[in-house]
Image (cartoon, rainbow, N blue to C red):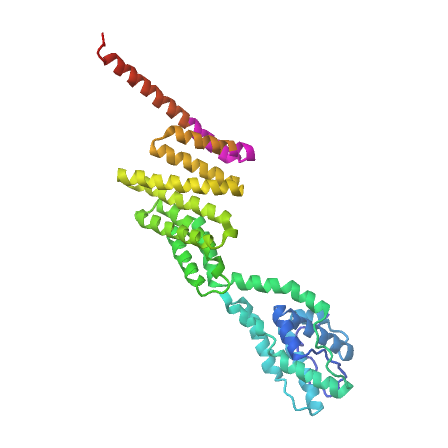
Amino acid sequence: MENKNCMVESDAQEFTSEIEYFTASTYKLVMMSFLTMGIYNQYWFYKNWVAIKKSEKPEILPFWRAIFAQLWSYSVFFRVQRDVNERNISLSVFAGASAFIYFFMQALWKLPELYWILGMFSFLPLVPANRAAAELNREKFGLSMKNKKITKWNLLLIIFFAPLLVFNTVISTPTYTNYLLAEDSFEKGEFHQSKILYEKSIESCSTSFLFGWYEYEIRFSYGRMLNEYSKISESSSDLFLESRLQFEWVIDYLDENPELISTKAQALSNLANTYQQQAAATDSNEEYFKLLEVAFRIYRESAEQLEVNQDWKNLSYTYYNLGQTSDWYGDVGEAIKWLEKAVELDKKFGFSQDFKEDSEYLNSLKDKYKEINESKRDFEAEVEEKAPSST
């Protein structure tokens, strides 16, 4: 086993080295390191430890020294500097400084948001050592730099890591970070905190080249949260208006992007819900009925599009809301018609939880409709009895 207390080992002893170092062109080293998120650095160290094992230290384990390169980098840099000095080559590796910088830059990967990208530049301390090693190979063995082109194995490595690089970059942006935190706060019922985070996420969208196109999704979620928040907040009217603005923004955006028509139908349904919920919160009878009329009209438009899109789950929700809006408006017969459509969809597509809830509401509407009709008949009979005879 290796002795981890000997990270520099017997590097100070004097002898002529016969190490044939692994090198790559500076361009390839930089590009491969960056696109593989530093994995190529580990490969560079591994190949050089294999070369050192072959020439000097048969007992070492190259794989583990490469894995813990931040601890063992000095030994590689020192050997290159030692050999450069022996050959009187006027190149400097700066072994100690390079090892310290490499160790420090490995810690930068843990930085929050996009600051972790600074760790992507961990190839910098390798560049002087790589250049010096290439010159040593030329001086000692007459070897020219051949490792310049991207091989098929290099390409496979890039193909594997490039999506991870993009993904890590995306999820580290303030836009996405705040969006996830806002969603989490929403699920916990922390509406005020969620509102603040959504606003930060939307604000950063305008300056984000990664998220400008995704703003409509964030605003859509923000609108839904505001609609729920309005149900418990004392300033519900302001929240309804703010929620409505989000859905109207989304609908305007989707009008310019017809390929996203399914999302537009959902946005319409949520927009209608802002009017319906505001109707429930108002004290004015006139405003109450006007808001319900607007909600009903938008729900109808949404339902037509959802049916075309065959979005049966959201269509079932919208039928339910159409029925509820009709019920609140006082048209129980119309409400029954829409609830029957909702129950039919629930049954057909196996929406068991919705089927139970919708069926209960439908049955209560039917009972209500029956009571209304009975009251109507009783009233008509009473009026008829009191009416004077024509004879």
**Left or right of 134 in this view: 96:** left
**Residue 166 against residue 225 in the figure, above or below:** below
Q: Which of 305 and 343 is in front in this view?
A: 305
**Near-viewer residue (105 or 306):** 306
Give the x, y percent position of residue 306.
49, 42
57, 107: nearer the viewer:
107
Q: Position of residue 18 (x, y in %)?
A: 77, 84
Magenta range: 345-363
Give the main secondary structure, helix, strand or loop, of the magenta stretch: helix
Residue 139 in sight from this viewpoint: yes
**Residue drawn at point x = 50 percent, y = 49 percent:** 261
Residue at figure coordinates x 72%, y 81% from the top left: 145
* Residue 190 visible here: no
Q: How many labels does the image show?
A: 0
Taking the magenta stretch, the answer to whether it contains residue 353 is yes
Name the residue rendered at 65%, 70% in the picture: 68
Q: Which of the 4 quarters of the picture holds residue 133?
A: bottom right
Instruction: State whether residue 313 is above or below residue 224.
Output: above
160 on left or right of 290: right
Assess whether residue 162 is covered by the magenta stretch.
no
